[in-house]
Amino acid sequence: MLTLVGQDHTGIVAAVTRVLSDHDCMLSEASMMRLGGNFSMMMMVGAEASAETLNTLLNSIAHSMGLCVHVDEAAGKPHQHIQPNVEVRVMGADRAGIVSSVTSALADCEVNIVDLESDVIGKQDEPVYIMNILGVSTAPIETLQKRLEEADLKAVDVSVSAVETLIA
Amino acid sequence: MAVQDILTIPDERLKQVSQPVESFDEQLHWQLQDLEDTRQAGPAAVGIAAPQIGWFQRAVIVDVSGRKKTPSHGYLELINPEILEWDDFKLGREGCLSVPDFTGNVIRAKNIKLRAFDRHGSMLEFDMTGFEARAIQHEIDHLDGILFPDRVVSRRSDLFQRKVYQASTKK
């Protein structure tokens, strides 16, 4: 598993993947995005070379580009997707503790979070927190709704809906 | 019973445009049987399109009646289907027998008016909504050589749009 973070600028993905490609690495699932002016990467890499070798190779370019990069040995392989069956949408005036309250409620219901995206939007002096969670739940939607209501999220809107995947 | 192999990506044949059915004969009936046998043999698919089994004519089967609380016209064999009208749109998650191990969000019309022919060549018209309408649009795309990953939208951009959908549907 390769993780990278650093000041965003052009050419980061190209430079990193060039090194990996030159050493016959196979790239699979990845999440890369700009977060608060930083560029971040998390990527599964299949490689003959050891994590130590890849760390050395990548760090040689990372320092010059102002990036912090790290490769760890990690179990896992492609084709391990699980289908989410619930979606939780959250939006409200930004304050500390929203994520903690929502995800604690979900954890109590044994929801497995498979994807979480969030952002701070709205006006600078009136920031709004927005979050979208996909999860796998064995409990019915009504149970999650009840538990989230009990979490007393005050001025934060939370809605839970089923994710129904059409296979055709 | 003749279960056929399902074409999967990156098979180029999935990109070809299928031709209209012209003869509503016994051969068509056999091919429809193969199509349904193949749908039934695989993972729980609510629809299948002829090109998915290498039959490049405009025929699809859709049946969403097995789902709870889902408006449905039951088991449908639809020949030369054509969407006459669209209304409203909705985001929903889709997967496909021809695109293993991938699902994604796709915007589809929520309500459609559909014209098609049955296996004997009689004209049919349906007003469809929700999941059934989505299934039809997914299948008609196959007839035009379009796969759902061509239409997948980023969930991140959707983060901001959700509330707008909700507000407008609550009214």
Image (cartoon, rainbow, N blue to C red):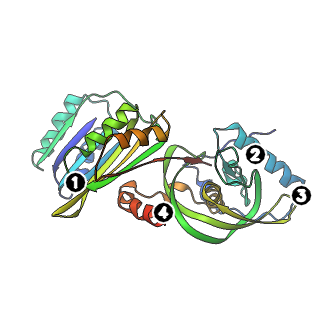
- The answer to whether marks 4 and 2 mark residues whose Cβ atoms lie closer than 8 Å is no
Q: Which residue is drawn at 26% across and 47% down?
A: A18
Does residue A14 appear in this view? no
Secondary structure beneath label 2:
helix
Q: Is residue A40 left or right of residue A110?
A: left
Residue identified by numbered label 2: B36
Residue identified by numbered label 3: B25
Residue type pointed to by label 2: Glu
Residue identified by numbered label 4: B170
Secondary structure beneath label 1:
loop
Nearest-to-viewer mark from 1 and 2: 1
Q: In which quarter of the image is the N terminus of chain A?
A: top left
Secondary structure beneath label 3:
loop
Q: Which of B10 and B86 is in front in this view?
A: B86
What is the chain identity of the residue bearing mark 1? A
Q: Position of residue A55 (x, y in %)?
A: 18, 34
The answer for how far apart the CA atoms under marks 1 and 2 are is 52 Å
Residue type pointed to by label 1: Asp
What is the chain identity of the residue bearing mark 2? B
Q: In this view, does A132 lie to the left or right of B127?
A: left
Secondary structure beneath label 4:
helix
Q: Position of residue B99 (x, y in %)?
A: 55, 47
Q: Nearer the viewer, residue B87 or B116?
A: B87
Residue type pointed to by label 3: Asp
Residue identified by numbered label 1: A94
- The answer to whether marks 3 and 1 mark residues whose Cβ atoms lie closer than 8 Å is no
Nearest-to-viewer mark from 4 and 3: 4
| Vertical arrangement, residue B44 with respect to residue A132, above or below | above
Residue type pointed to by label 4: Lys
Q: Nearer the viewer, residue A79 or B138?
A: B138
> Of marks 3 and 2, which one's residue comes earlier in the chain?
3
What is the chain identity of the residue bearing mark 4? B
